[in-house]
Image: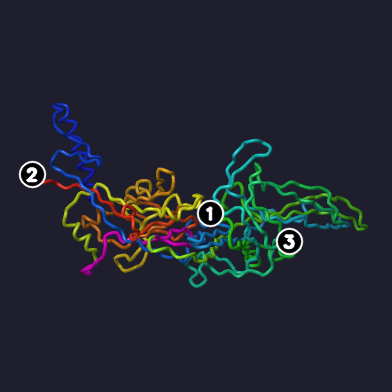
């Protein structure tokens, strides 16, 4: 690699400098800021290449988590609508887990007794991503995290019984894992399980507790319980229809539908938490916590009666919890926004959009290599630094930058040498790591989004040396944690993205020459001897 040769050269030159400096300080050695010492034998330069930037639609992403341990890092729920990008309506699909200690009655009573069960309340509870602002034991205050959009505009929220059977095996090829894309079509029942249909939902950091009215067999309320997650962590709390849940779940406890988890999954295939609307907010939710987990709680009271109707015990309270577990998928319904203008390109996460970069021009002689690359290979440069800079279109910056991606990801988005179209890692992610490659959002002097810069020195060095000829178009998309290689041998770029943020970038057509997308190469050449 050219860069590795450059590093060796640096070490030698620095060592010579230290030795000579002991004898004399008269020599004119100058640090030129690129870790190369200039003693008259080398000269350093840089050159800028314009990059052609085009937009590309992302049809879908993988939304099942099977390739990454069975679960996604985050699940989106809600509606986000910005006219510059796609509108996204995000829903959650999930199986339920049977409670391990499922019993209707804990004790055995006399043969002359009857157990009457009353469903008190059924709640779907999902913890928010939240940060504790105060540590007071009472009235702790939280801030909701990972929400974009307008939190003061409600969206419609409903819960449905899922009718699509979820399997982790491909039904066509059982030896292979199944794949659920983000635009997968799921069959769901027409009945809405939530007590208040078409809930007009807005995130609420004060939603920290629910109050459960416990009832006797007569319907009389005998007490009220306060239900909350530990430390009063705020949560989404959706009351479900008690009679419907009793029919679908509770009354099935002692049937064959509950003999095993597999039997239950075939009978009750899961739920779909569906968000719809023209506007609102989009929440990122963690369903994988070891402490706070999403669940459906069935709160009920057993009243024990004698044959004569005399009450023996009348306040036996119970709760059965069905965790949202097993196969859990995301579902994104997207609607195109207005098209990008001639001078800009939209970058949007999830099943949004990305950019493709042509960094060294065209292959006019049709020999498989861009003409600019062929010319550069004749120069025998030592590459000090190679950076791609993409500028933000400041006329499309949102006042609320919480929806602005903090990092973009760059990768090879084109054909392999064998002609296969497959996204692959840029060399520097494996040799240098994500921090060296960069791609983080940079702000201007007014703290406004300004640009993203990628350092791909090793990749460009290999290209110019002729060690590799792999130069497809480069793809740029919103960064997701699954994008990074798992090892130095991992070239795969996985098709996951649950980061919904978006940004508008300027392309090569902008009239502002100083903000055109560009590749800057800094290099060293040996000068002619006098």
Camera-side residue of 267 and 246? 246
Circles 1 and 3, Cβ within 8 Å, touching? The answer is no
Q: Secondary structure at mark 2?
A: loop
Q: Is residue 403 above or below residue 509?
A: above
Mark nearer the N terminus (1 vs 2): 1
- On screen, residue 406 versus residue 52, left or right, reads right
Mark nearer the N terminus (1 vs 3): 1
Mark nearer the N terminus (2 vs 3): 3
Give yes or no for residue 215 being in the magenta stretch: no
Q: Which residues are magenta?
A: 344-367
Circles 1 and 2, Cβ within 8 Å, touching? The answer is no
**Looking at the image, which residue is at 41% across and 46% down?**
443
Q: Which of the 4 image quadrants contains residue 464?
A: bottom left
Q: Are there few (<14), some (14-19), or many (20+) residues within 10 Å of tag 3? A: some
Residue indicated by mark 1: 74
Camera-side residue of 343 and 113? 343
Residue indicated by mark 3: 241
Camera-side residue of 197 and 507? 507
Q: Position of residue 208 (x, y in %)?
A: 67, 46
Q: Residue furthest front?
A: 511
Camera-side mark, 2 or 3: 2
Circles 2 and 3, Cβ within 8 Å, touching? The answer is no
Q: Secondary structure at mark 3?
A: loop
Q: What kind of colouring is applied to the model shown?
A: rainbow
Q: Residues under labels 1 and 2: Cα distance?
A: 61 Å
Q: Secondary structure at mark 1?
A: loop
- On screen, residue 465 versus residue 338, left or right, reads left
């Amino acid at each position: 690699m050219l860069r590795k040769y450059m590093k060796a050269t640096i070490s030698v030159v620095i060592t010579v400098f230290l030795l000579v400096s002991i004898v004399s300080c008269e020599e004119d050695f100058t640090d030129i800021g690129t870790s190369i010492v200039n003693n008259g034998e080398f000269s350093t330069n840089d050159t800028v290449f314009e990059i052609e930037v085009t937009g590309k639609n992302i049809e879908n992403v993988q939304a099942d988590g099977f390739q990454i341990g069975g679960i996604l890092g985050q699940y989106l729920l809600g509606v986000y609508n910005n006219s510059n990008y796609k509108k996204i309506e995000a829903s959650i699909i999930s199986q339920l887990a049977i409670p391990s200690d499922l019993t209707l009655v804990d004790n055995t009573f006399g043969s002359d007794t009857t157990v009457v069960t009353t469903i008190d309340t059924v709640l779907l509870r999902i913890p928010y991503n939240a940060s504790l602002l105060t540590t007071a034991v009472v009235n702790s205050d939280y801030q909701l995290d990972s929400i974009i959009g307008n939190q003061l505009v409600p969206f419609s929220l409903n819960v449905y019984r899922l009718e699509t059977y979820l399997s982790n095996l491909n039904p066509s090829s059982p030896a292979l894992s199944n794949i659920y894309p983000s635009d997968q079509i799921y069959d769901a029942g027409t009945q809405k399980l939530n007590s208040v249909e078409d809930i007009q939902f807005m995130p609420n950091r004060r939603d920290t507790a629910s109050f459960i009215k416990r009832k006797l067999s007569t319907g009389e309320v005998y007490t009220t319980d306060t239900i909350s997650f530990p430390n009063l962590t705020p949560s989404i709390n959706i009351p479900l229809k008690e009679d419907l849940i009793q029919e679908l779940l509770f009354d099935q406890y002692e049937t064959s539908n509950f003999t095993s988890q597999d039997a239950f999954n075939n009978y009750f295939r899961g739920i779909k938490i569906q968000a719809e609307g023209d506007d609102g907010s989009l929440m990122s939710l963690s369903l994988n916590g070891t402490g706070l987990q999403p669940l459906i709680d069935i709160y009920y009271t057993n009243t024990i009666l004698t044959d004569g109707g005399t009450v023996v015990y009348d306040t036996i309270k119970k709760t059965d919890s069905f965790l949202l577990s097993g196969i859990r998928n995301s579902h994104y319904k997207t609607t195109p926004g207005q098209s990008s203008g001639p001078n800009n390109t939209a970058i949007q996460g999830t099943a949004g959009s990305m950019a493709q970069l042509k960094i060294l021009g065209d292959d006019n002689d049709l020999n498989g290599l861009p003409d600019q690359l062929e010319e550069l290979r004749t120069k025998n440069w030592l590459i000090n630094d190679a950076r791609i800079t993409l500028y933000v279109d400041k006329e499309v910056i949102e006042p609320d930058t919480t929806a602005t991606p903090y990092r973009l990801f760059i990768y090879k988005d084109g054909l392999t040498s064998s002609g296969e179209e497959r996204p692959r890692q840029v060399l520097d992610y494996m040799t240098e790591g994500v921090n060296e490659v960069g791609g983080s959002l940079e702000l201007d002097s007014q703290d406004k989004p300004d640009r993203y810069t990628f350092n791909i020195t090793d990749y460009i060095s290999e290209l110019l040396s002729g060690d590799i000829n792999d130069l497809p178009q480069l793809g740029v998309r919103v960064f997701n944690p699954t994008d990074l290689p798992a090892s130095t041998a991992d070239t795969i770029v996985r098709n996951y993205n649950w980061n919904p943020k978006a940004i508008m970038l300027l392309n090569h057509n902008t009239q502002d020459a100083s903000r055109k997308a560009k590749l800057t190469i800094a290099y060293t050449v040996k000068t002619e001897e006098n």
